[in-house]
Amino acid sequence: MYSAVILAGGKSPWLKEVAGTPYRAWAPLKGKPMALYIAEALLQSRKVDKVLIVGPKMAVPCSLPKNVEVIEAGDTLMATVTLALGYLGTKHPVIFVTDDIPCLTAAAVADFVEQAEVLHADVCYTVIPRAAVEKAFPAAKRTYVKIKEGKFTGGNMFLVDPTVVPQCREQVEAVFAKRKDIFSLCKWLGWSFIFKYIIGVLTLTQVEKRASKLFGFKGRAVITNYATIGMDVDKLADWRLAEKFLAEVEKGEREIDG
């Protein structure tokens, strides 16, 4: 069994009007904070026995279920990750999830963990085929990357060996700072890598190897058809899609994705 961390320090100003709070984790979607949907999916997967929500503790809107705790987030993503690991300890791999995927299902969590365990990597991350997203959420607008194996979007779940975090902290923060500077990001990735992507010959294995070299750990991608792992709520249209999805699940009109 794993401990899981929900990274919940983020704000979305547009949420204030629709949900009464800018904090994504505590925004009440159909009457329940988004983070609690995620926590329930993690615990129901039978792969997780403890959930730590790292976010604004003073904004917690309700009592928490058993095995769910909250601690205050740090000033940056990696500071938050470090705080979480300091609280949980670093002896065992930890699942990290973002705070904006309320449609996450227990089946999606279990499938990811089972695939990741056999890869024996330091960090496993999720990628989702475009066809899977469009089947589950036809109206969703996602960003896709085209590689030789097909078109994929990134997911929001990771399995991490805590011992590699200190050595990659500086690189992760540097990349995060470059995320809106395309030229700097391309230079960091390497122009030959970018060229392969442009002409359509870049493979998933090459992406894994490049990421591993740049960050200093063994990273592997888990291809999952569970689109809920990538259905993050970052705009009003996504909020409405999540409402619809959860209402259909509640009525038994929706099958588990994947």
Image: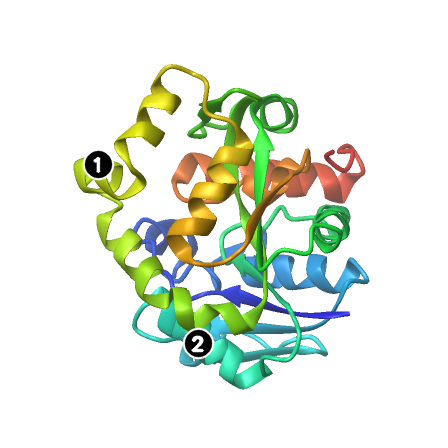
User: In this figure, which residue is indicated by the disc labeled 2?
Assistant: 82
Residue at the image position 42 percent from the left and 50 percent from the top: 213
Q: Secondary structure at mark 1?
A: helix
Left or right: 192 with respect to 53? Answer: left
Q: Kindly identify which numbered label has been placed on residue 182.
A: 1
Quadrant containing the N terminus in the rendered view: bottom right
Residue toward you, 192 or 114: 192
**Residue 149's x, y, as percent?**
57, 22
Residue toward you, 217 or 258: 217
**Residue 53's x, y, as percent?**
54, 72
**Residue 65 in view here:** yes
The correct choice, above or below, for 62 with respect to 128 in the image is below
Is the residue marked by circle 2 packed among few (<14), some (14-19), or many (20+) residues within 10 Å?
some
Q: Secondary structure at mark 2?
A: helix
Render colour scheme: rainbow
**Residue 180's x, y, as percent?**
22, 42
Name which residue type carries label 1.
Ile
Left or right: 234 with respect to 93? Answer: left
Pick whichever of labels 2 and 1 is earlier in the sequence.
2
Which quadrant would residue 96 be assigned to in this image? bottom right
Which quadrant would residue 2 be assigned to in this image? bottom right
Is the residue marked by circle 1 packed among few (<14), some (14-19), or many (20+) residues within 10 Å?
few
Left or right: 220 with respect to 199? Answer: right
Residue at the image position 60 percent from the left and 36 percent from the top: 244
Name which residue type carries label 2.
Thr
